[in-house]
Image (cartoon, grey):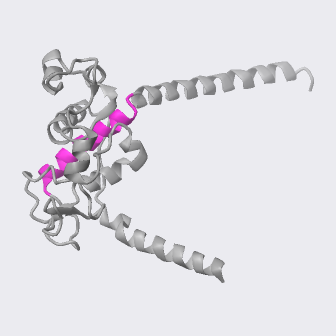
């Protein structure tokens, strides 16, 4: 009996979670790490909107500058005061201050695109709505009772007023969130484009080798028949 009770509870919980975050409620994420201009904008938005609380400890400013084809002047605008090009992208807020101000220390986002996925991040960023019961004055549809404030408060998004809305958002909000998530996708695996290109070359080589091997096999075994 206990066994069936556990199964029923699990199915009920899964159904509830699916109802909360069904695919029909989500807006499609359309970022592309091949879009260098989007990555450059995303880096700028991240530094200005997110890096006050969040770190990118596994990414150095110099890596961003080289990978995103930034000029020295453009890279200089991203570097936090007191930091240098070879320093990791960390903020000035201590974990203790984050815990005291938000109730939880803001996490490092270096690998968040790989652990959470880009679609989740995108819908989280556009999912804030007014909620006076929360200390920050906002809540989030994808992550209820989040401690994170709405960093996009200056972007008009008049559709976010009730929890049962259709998740439609302003064009400006969509564009900014897409660029930030695109940048975080790049940060999660800076070598992904090189890896994909190398994969194509390896597959091409293996296909060519298969053709040569098959032709060699026919040449060797034709005498046997």
Q: Is residue 80 left or right of residue 122?
A: left
The residue at 17%/64% (across/down) is: 129
Examine the rendered structure and indicate whether residue 18 appears above or below residue 210.
below
Residue 163 position by quadrant = bottom left
Q: Is residue 181 left or right of residue 193?
A: left
Camera-side residue: 202 or 75?
75
Q: Residue furthest bottom?
A: 1
- Asked whether residue 222 is drawn in magenta, I would say no
Camera-side residue: 122 or 150?
150
Write down the region rendered in magenta. Answer: 170-190
- Asked whether residue 183 is drawn in magenta, I would say yes
Camera-side residue: 203 or 85?
85
Picture mark count: 0
Camera-side residue: 100 or 25?
100
Asked if one can make out residue 164 in the rendered structure from this viewpoint, the answer is: yes
Quarter of the image with the C terminus is top right
Residue 59 position by quadrant = top left
Examine the rendered structure and indicate whether residue 145 appears above or below residue 37.
below
Residue 66 screen position, x and y as percent: 28, 19
Examine the rendered structure and indicate whether residue 93 appears above or below residue 116.
above
Residue 104 screen position, x and y as percent: 29, 51
- Name the chief secondary structure element in magenta: helix
The residue at 41%/74% (across/down) is: 16
The residue at 48%/77% (across/down) is: 12
Residue 31 screen position, x and y as percent: 29, 43
């Amino acid at each position: 009996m206990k066994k069936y009770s556990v199964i029923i509870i699990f199915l009920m919980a899964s159904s509830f979670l699916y109802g909360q975050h069904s695919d029909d409620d989500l807006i499609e994420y359309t970022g592309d790490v091949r879009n260098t201009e989007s990555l450059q904008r995303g880096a700028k938005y991240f530094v200005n909107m997110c890096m006050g609380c969040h770190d990118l400890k596994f990414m150095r400013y110099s890596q961003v500058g080289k990978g995103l084809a930034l000029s020295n002047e453009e890279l200089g605008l991203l570097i936090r005061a007191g930091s240098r090009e070879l320093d990791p992208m960390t903020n000035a807020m201590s974990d203790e201050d984050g815990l005291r101000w938000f109730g939880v220390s803001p996490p490092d986002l270096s690998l968040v695109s790989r652990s959470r996925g880009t679609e989740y991040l995108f819908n989280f960023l556009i999912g804030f709505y007014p909620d006076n019961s929360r200390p920050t004055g906002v809540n989030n549809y994808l992550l209820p009772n989040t401690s994170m404030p709405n960093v996009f408060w200056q972007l008009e998004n008049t559709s976010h007023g009730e929890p049962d809305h259709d998740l439609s958002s302003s064009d400006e909000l969509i564009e900014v969130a897409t660029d930030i998530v695109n940048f975080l996708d790049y940060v999660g695996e800076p070598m992904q484009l090189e890896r994909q290109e190398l994969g194509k070359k390896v597959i091409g080589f293996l296909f060519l080798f298969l053709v040569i091997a098959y032709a060699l096999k026919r040449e060797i075994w034709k005498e046997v028949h």
